[in-house]
Image (cartoon, coloured by chain):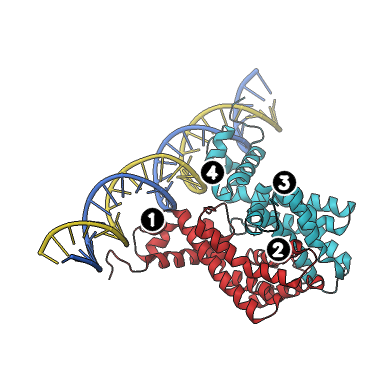
Chain colours: A cyan, B red, C yellow, D blue
DNA sequence: CGTCAATCTTGACGATGGAAAGTATCCGCT
DNA sequence: AGCGGATACTTTCCATCGTCAAGATTGACG
């Protein structure tokens, strides 16, 4: 049982890392602690990921693939606004992954797997904007992405609750954030 | 000259840290290296900042105050869109500060100085939105902040250039990013 | 000139990620 | 069955980092 072969160390490490990151942020991630939790030595991860950066890269790839799936689902099932909301929903539901996915300073951005996963993850957003037939598609794309990414980031960092004190109650609960994202996105609609 | 009293160690450390962070990200910041660069011992910063967190907090406070000044200037001198553009411009011009300002996982968010600086920095944005008299001021506020914060974040992480490959050339040069922010913001205008 | 507070240094500690070398387990082949 | 490599994990050691306690140096003020 507790032998040399764990069986699924790779996934266990990714899950452990994502969990820690969602609680303490990337800075609070100690691979030694994750390894201890799982019950392996502190260098066990190297066979699977090479380095700490490798772990984060794998997490980013996994996150992008999950995001791609979510967005595709929302794109095929609802209106375009739902794709944006799905983006925010994903971020709130997978904070450990989301916290890493766009931190290019922590990742090996030349990793082909990561490049591919990133391009795949945002395709539904891109395609949805194109389908809208906006006058300035590039700006529209950036605006939509900016709104959802910005809302997600601000909500995750707690900035939303802290700074928008007046009108907002406790907007960091998922439902409120999603509603906010939906309303903010709808302000972009007219040209579509 | 090279005695026990540096004269302005505090500012030197903040400047050094901001410079390193803008190059290597927060993760790449070594206070020992910054100290060595300046020519002081590796614990000299503790008198001024207490801890590493203290350095980052001071950087965040400084950044928020600088941002407040920039936004106030833009608010009094131009249209509202210019305030948003100033937000993006600040982020691109001060990546070291910006990278820390919203990383609540790295900061002591109970620091009164930080709380105050944060509230001050976003006031021009908030007031500008209010003055627009939008139907849903909260959503408008979030949308504007989301767009500019999202664009800034995506540009800084290089994600903008990487993922929006097709239509965009090399959009990470300041002028392009600012133009993009302006166009994206203008898509929000109609209800104002 | 002497005292005292402010500023910086020295030296040590625990924790972390990484490198090198070793050990156990599994799988295919005969 | 058993043997031989490939795979998965461990052990040990190292450099670096932030932190801490204690000490040295300086400047200002009497």
Residue at the (52%, 38%) spot, across then down: A42
Residue A21, can we see it?
A: yes
Asked whether the residues under the numbered discs 3 and 4 touch, taking CB atoms below 8 Å apart as contact, a structural biologist would say no
Which labelled disc corresponds to residue A30?
A: 4
Mark 2 vs 3: CB contact within 8 A = no
Judged from the image, the secondary structure of the residue bearing numbered disc 2 is: helix
In this picture, is B98 found above or below D24? below
User: Which residue is pictured at 78% across the width and 66% down the height?
Assistant: A141
- For marks 4 and 1, give the one nearer the viewer: 1
Image quadrant for the C terminus of chain A? bottom right
Chain letter for the residue marked with disc 4 in the picture: A
Q: According to the image, label 3 marks what residue?
A: A93
The numbered mark 1 sits on a residue in which chain? B
User: Which residue is denoted by mark 2 in the rendering?
Assistant: B146
- Kindly indicate whether the residues beneath marks 4 and 2 are on one polypeptide chain: no
Q: Residues within 10 Å of mark 2 (few under 14, many from 20)?
A: many
Q: Chain of mark 2?
A: B
Of pointers 3 and 4, the one earlier in the residue sequence: 4
Which is nearer the N-term, disc 1 or disc 2?
1
User: Closer to us: mark 4 or mark 2?
Assistant: 2
Most foreground residue, A26 or A184: A184
Q: Few, some or many C-alpha atoms within 10 Å of disc 3 (few <14, some 14-19, many ≥20)?
A: few
- The residue lying at 65 percent from left, 67 percent from top is B152
> Residue B160 at x, y = what percent?
70, 66
Q: Give yes or no for contact between labels 1 and 2 (Cβ–Cβ under 8 Å).
A: no
Label 2 and label 3: CA atoms lie apart by 19 Å
Contact, mark 4 vs mark 2 (Cβ under 8 Å)? no
As measured in the structure, the alpha-carbon distance from the residue carrying label 3 to the one carrying label 1 is 38 Å
Q: Residue at x 71, y 69 (%)?
A: B129
- Spatial separation of the CA atoms under disc 4 and disc 1: 24 Å
Q: Both on one chain, marks 3 and 1? A: no
Element class at badge 1: helix
């Amino acid at each position: 049982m507790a032998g040399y072969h764990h069986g699924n160390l790779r996934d266990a490490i990714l899950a452990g890392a994502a969990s820690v990151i969602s609680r303490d942020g990337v800075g609070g991630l100690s691979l030694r602690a994750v390894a201890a939790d799982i019950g392996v030595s502190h260098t066990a991860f190297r066979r699977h990921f090479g380095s700490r950066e490798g772990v984060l890269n794998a997490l980013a790839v996994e996150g992008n693939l999950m995001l791609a799936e979510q967005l595709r689902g929302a794109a095929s099932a609802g209106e375009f606004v739902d794709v944006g909301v799905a983006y925010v929903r994903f971020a709130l539901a997978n904070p450990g992954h989301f916290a890493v996915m766009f931190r290019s300073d922590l990742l090996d951005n030349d990793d082909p797997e990561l490049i591919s996963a990133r391009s795949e993850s945002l395709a539904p957003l891109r395609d949805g904007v194109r389908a809208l037939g906006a006058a300035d598609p590039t700006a529209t794309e950036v605006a939509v992405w900016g709104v959802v990414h910005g809302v997600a980031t601000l909500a995750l960092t707690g900035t939303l609750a802290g700074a928008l004190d007046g009108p907002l109650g406790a907007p960091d609960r998922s439902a409120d954030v999603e509603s906010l994202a939906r309303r903010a996105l709808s302000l972009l609609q007219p040209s579509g």
